[in-house]
């Protein structure tokens, strides 16, 4: 919602700070982050699902599965040349993984 609602303000900020025209700012940064966020939303159920794996003979008749869990807090360091893309794209993955 922030990217959609604040799109013009973000593009104007990129124009003022980096002299980047709106088309370049949108296609090289905002659009890519929007697609990454939509991809994460589309596949989140698949990424969170339990994955069954083979059980060794010692644990038969049990079953084994892998459960994805977040590690906790993450640090994201952005760069000045593509500040939105290089800061928000890793943020999408970190939030999708359940990290803070």
Image (cartoon, helix red, strand yellow):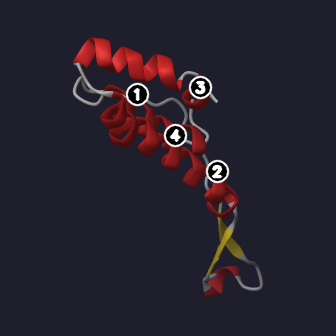
Number of residue marks: 4
| C-alpha distance separating marks 3 and 2 | 16 Å
Q: Position of residue 97 (x, y in %)?
A: 57, 45
| C-alpha distance separating marks 1 and 2 | 22 Å
> Which residue was labeled with disc 1?
75
| C-alpha distance separating marks 3 and 1 | 21 Å
Label 1 or label 2, whichever lies nearer to me, is 2
Whichever of labels 2 and 4 marks the residue nearer the N terminus, that label is 2
Q: Residues within 10 Å of mark 4 (few under 14, many from 20)?
A: some
Q: Residues within 10 Å of mark 2 (few under 14, many from 20)?
A: few
| C-alpha distance separating marks 2 and 4 | 10 Å
Pointers 3 and 1 in contact (CB under 8 A)?
Answer: no
Q: Quadrant of residue 6?
A: top right
Q: Position of residue 5 (x, y in %)?
A: 61, 24
Label 3 or label 1, whichever lies nearer to me, is 3
Q: Position of residue 68 (x, y in %)?
A: 61, 55
Q: Quadrant of residue 55?
A: bottom right
As helix, strand or loop, the secondary structure at mark 4 comes to: helix
Whichever of labels 4 and 3 marks the residue nearer the N terminus, that label is 3
Whichever of labels 1 and 4 marks the residue nearer the N terminus, that label is 1
As helix, strand or loop, the secondary structure at mark 2 comes to: helix
> Which residue was labeled with disc 2?
41
Residues 91 and 64: in front is 91
In the picture, measured across the screen, residue 44 lies left or right of residue 91, that is right
Whichever of labels 1 and 2 marks the residue nearer the N terminus, that label is 2
In the picture, measured across the screen, residue 18 lies left or right of residue 90, that is left
> Which residue was labeled with disc 4?
92
**Residue 63 sits above or below residue 15 on the image:** below
> Which residue was labeled with disc 3?
2
**Residue 70 sits above or below residue 13 on the image:** below
| C-alpha distance separating marks 4 and 3 | 13 Å
């Amino acid at each position: 919602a922030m990217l959609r609602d604040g799109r013009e303000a973000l593009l104007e900020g990129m124009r003022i700070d980096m002299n980047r025209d709106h088309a370049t700012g949108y296609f090289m940064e905002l659009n890519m982050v929007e697609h990454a966020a939509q991809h994460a939303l589309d596949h989140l159920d698949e990424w969170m699902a339990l994955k069954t794996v083979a059980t060794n003979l010692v644990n038969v008749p049990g079953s084994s599965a892998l459960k994805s869990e977040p590690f906790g807090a993450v640090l994201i360091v952005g760069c000045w040349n593509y500040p939105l893309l290089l800061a928000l794209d890793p943020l999408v993955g970190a939030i999708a993984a359940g990290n803070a």
